[in-house]
Amino acid sequence: MTVSTNSTGKTLPPGIYCPTVTFFKPTREQELDIETHVKHMEFLAKAGLDGVVLQGSTGEAVALNREEKKELIRTARDAFIRCGNHGAIIAGTVGAQSTREAIQLARDGAEAGADFALALPPSYFPGHMSNDACQAFFEELADASPIPIIIYSYPGVSSGIQLSSELTMKLAKHPNIAGIKHTDHDIGRIAREASVKSYGSPYTILGGATDYLLGTVAVGGHGAITGMTNVAPRAVAKVYELASSGRSAEALELAGLISRAEWSLGKGGLLGTKWATVWSCHYPEAAALARRPLPTVSAETKKHVEAECAELVEIERSLEKQGYVGSGLQTKAKQDVSATKTNGLLHTVKQKIAEL
């Protein structure tokens, strides 16, 4: 399916996006740690990602106020521009429990410099959120939003609400709905949506994890918004590039390694993802703190994450040294490294780790 341009002139490009973690200072008030946030935005921008999601589920959106959300968007936008990456800045409206609030957060995002807004259905009263109620919510939000909306299908954080294929395929026709993030982990739904040749309006179909990125691409999806990119953005971008270009064997080996690492993050939940990010990027240990009342990450989770992610982080560093970047920067830098045999890279890293 060809992704067309919507009424705002903005298209959500196919590719790999990072739902970023949010960093807090180790103080009583746990203010935003903007210094570490900017470092992380620069790390992601220089890796060549196609964009970032601020204050999504991984970004602890429900623990942030409106001004904090706008500050995170502004500083992310500035960091990406400084790095020469003009990828999409996506504002999460995660946690909004009314249409009015979701519209306000979308407007805030646009004011701060976001290109798109990612929206979950309100879910505090799930028994009342029928397909018709969800359709009305997304259509009213899209009608009022100054930036295109990305549907966020994530039953795990929205009281089990399932957005049916019939519903999302109706919503895809709205001129200000730009696409969907499938953290419902349902390849069948991705395949059904991708099978439609044209919705008459843009609809970029993204998976919600790297676990099934190859499956997403195989059935016609357009990439992923995946938390694993906080740790290994180049490696994930490489898998997408290999899969999209038909280099299946190389894509499969690297994707399997990423999947094992991602499973350790999943087992550790948000705290595991934050620790993996801080550990792999050498940020201050205190930056792994989640906002209270969430607890600190356990020693057991730290050990498990580090063990499962070690090989992948070595590959990430190797890709970085080679100068590899994802598609968000590839138009600026035609690179010979994109033709590197990834199997050889994996073999070299495995040898190094075995010698430790």
Image (cartoon, rainbow, N blue to C red):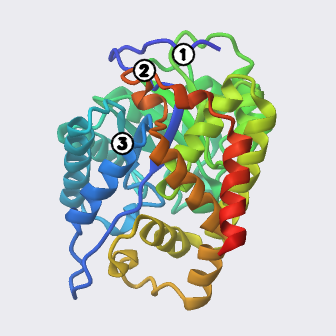
Please indicate, yes or no, whether residue 78 appears anywhere in the rendered image.
Answer: yes
Q: Position of residue 228 (x, y in %)?
A: 56, 55
In the figure, is residue 141 to the left or right of 350? left
Q: Callout 2: 10 Å neighbours few (<14), some, many (20+)?
A: many
In the displayed structure image, the side of residue 110 where residue 250 appears, left or right: right
- Based on the displayed image, in which of its 4 quarters is residue 9 positioned? top left
**Residue that mark 1 sits on:** 3
| Residue at the far front in the pictured view | 355
Amino acid on which the number 2 mark rests in the picture: Thr
Q: Where 137 falls versus 67 (above or below)?
A: above
If the image is split into quadrants, where does the C terminus sit?
bottom right
**Residue occupying the point 57% across, 59% down:** 314
Q: Which residue is mark 3?
A: 46
Q: Are marks 3 and 2 in contact (CB under 8 Å)?
A: no
Marks 3 and 1: which is nearer the front? Answer: 3
CB of mark 3 within 8 Å of CB of mark 1? no
Position of residue 20 relative to residue 214, above or below, is below
Report the side of 50 relative to 287 (left or right).
Answer: right
- How far across and how far down the image is residue 183, in percent? 63, 49
Mark-to-mark CA distance, 3 and 1: 25 Å
Do the numbered discs 2 and 1 sit on residues whose CB atoms are within 8 Å? yes
Mark 3 vs mark 1: which is more N-terminal?
Answer: 1
Looking at this view, is 110 or 344 the one in front? 344
Residue toward you, 20 or 62: 20
Give the residue at x 60% y 52%.
154
> Which class describes the residues within 10 Å of circle 3: few (<14), some (14-19), or many (20+)?
many
Please identify, in this view, whether the residue under mark 3 or under mark 2 is nearer the observer: 3
Residue position marked by numbered label 2 in the rendering: 11
